[in-house]
Amino acid sequence: MTEQPVPAQQSETAPAGDHQPIKQRKNGLYPAVSDELAAHMRGGWADTELRGLEPLPQAAETARRRAALSRRFPGERLVVPAGNLRTRSNDTEYPFRAGTEYAYLTGDQTEDGVLVLEPAADGGHEAVLHVLPRSDRENGEFWLDGQGELWVGRRYSLSENERRLGLPCRDVRKAAGELAESAGPVRLVRGHDAGLEEALAGRLDPARDEELRVFLSELRLVKDAFEIGELQKAVDSTVRGFEDVVKVLDRAEATSERYIEGTFFLRARVEGNDVGYGSICAAGPHATTLHWVRNDGPVRSGELLLLDAGVETHTLYTADVTRTLPVNGRFTDLQRKIYDAVYEAQEAGIAAVRPGAKYRDFHDAAQRVLAERLVEWGLVEGPVERVLELGLQRRWTLHGTGHMLGMDVHDCALARTETYVDGTLEPGMCLTVEPGLYFQADDLTVPEEYRGIGVRIEDDILVTEDGNRNLSAALPRASAEVESWMARLKG
Ligand code: GLY
Ligand code: MN
Ligand code: MN
């Protein structure tokens, strides 16, 4: 929540050339400025109201989602915050990323926003969006406040937002007080807005709030046509980002994994909002660390690069794709043997994705292939059934074979076991299939030549009416195709 702008009270003036909003200098109090300057700043500004704004493309979908939410919790006030800016250090903040639930239900992404579903007399709800309005010119907020528009850029006016989002909009600075004084049951999506949680502290019940988040997680399990289009955009940008990386592998060899991270990030920022998660740019033995995001190691010819990265679109849908590439463009015999086993496991996993299949099927199919290969290579004693029953292959397969994908990389994470992990696949679900084999550098149970090799192949798979569609099929997967693709790109 944003505090009320505070009128000028201090006498200190900002030293010439001090590039800070004045507010941040004195505990939220604006320093006094001369009456003449205040008057000079107040007037003489053009009317910039944007008339004729079109609704967002997803406005009909967000209304449908709010209606589903309303039906689930009749008679209760539901509060879904966007979240607030978070301090990185002193007076600098992390880039803002709106809470998934808020963006899913409104299409809006601005900090401090709060969606409230007010119970209505007919048993439904009236949805109201509380957002920051344009900065006030009368009290000087627009130039004196650190979040004033002169500092951070123009916001949409309340009426502009009403047209964009198809929701009545009010000034968010009154929302906490109004909610605290309201009567009746309230549920809040927690974890985004500490100020609201504090304001409603006496009114909230953690278990009931959790039910709200669980419902919103499950509502996102099946993607609508707009979402599928956005996921495909995210994947398409990601494919271009992977191509960018292959083209600069020589420069990464001359520097470090950071060159790969920066290269992919450039594509994510130019075409999308951001990366959907910290890029994993893991060369050599770093590929055996599942979430290697330090990305500060060397990139060496003869070794593998495991790149796990995804562009997040402007609407906050992310891809999640992994390719494991030979840095010099050619797999060694052992790298190819391990890579081909993971590829075969992924093929088996993808083949198990279809409507009506159990969610666990694709994991089981991939694990079986990997267990077979591990037994065949003499790394674990068979038979395969025993290995699978005892889970012995997991020393080298380490993680589950996939997860739901959407606005969060690990989407729908709060969905109940019966609707997700123990559930059944339906058309419109989108998930990753990402088996891997990881031989740690210090794993004395495998021959020395295996140590330090990690391979993961990850694609984004949409469940269709009659099977599945690989959204990331444009990126080659089979080892020979990866090699010829790299040769083409490296020129
Ligand atoms: N990028 C994280 C994952 O693959 O789940
Ligand atoms: Mn991934
Ligand atoms: Mn993944």
Image (tube, rainbow, N blue to C red):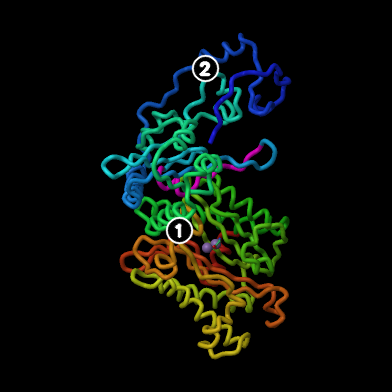
Q: Range of the magenta residues?
A: 92-106
Measure how far apart labels 1 and 2 are at the Cα level: 45 Å
Task: Please give the name of the residue rendered at 44% of the width and 68% of the height, measured from the top-left corner.
Answer: 421
Which comes before the other along the chain, label 1 or label 2?
A: 2
Q: Is mark 2 within 8 Å of ligand 1?
A: no
Instruction: Tell me if mark 1 has few (under 14), some (14-19) or many (20+) residues whose alpha carbon lies within 10 angstroms of its own.
Output: many
Locate residue 108, reporting x and y percent.
Answer: 44, 40
Q: Which residue is identified by label 1? A: 412
Ligand 2 location (quadrant): bottom right
Q: Residues within 10 Å of mark 2 (few under 14, many from 20)?
A: few
Give the residue type at disc 2.
Glu
Q: Where is 70 relative to 382, above or below?
A: above
Q: Residue furthest left?
A: 122
Position above or below: 201 against 297: above
Q: Residue shown at 48%/64% (left/top)? A: 403
Instruction: Kindly state the secondary structure of the residue where label 1 is placed.
Output: loop
Which residue is identified by label 2?
Answer: 138
Q: Residue 198 appears in which quarter of the rendering?
A: top right
In this view of the protein, which residue sits in the foreground, 475 or 152? 152
Q: In this picture, is 145 found above or below 369?
A: above
Image vertical order of residue 388 relative to residue 25, above or below = below
Residue 40 percent location from the top left of the image: 57, 11
Q: Are marks 1 and 2 in contact (CB under 8 Å)?
A: no
Q: Is residue 107 magenta?
A: no
Q: Is residue 196 left or right of residue 257?
A: left
382, 80: nearer the viewer: 80
Tell me the element at label 2: loop
Depth order, front residue of 288/393: 393
What's under tag 1, amino acid-wise? Cys
Q: Quadrant of residue 383?
A: bottom right
Furthest-top residue in this view: 36
Q: Is residue 473 visible?
A: no
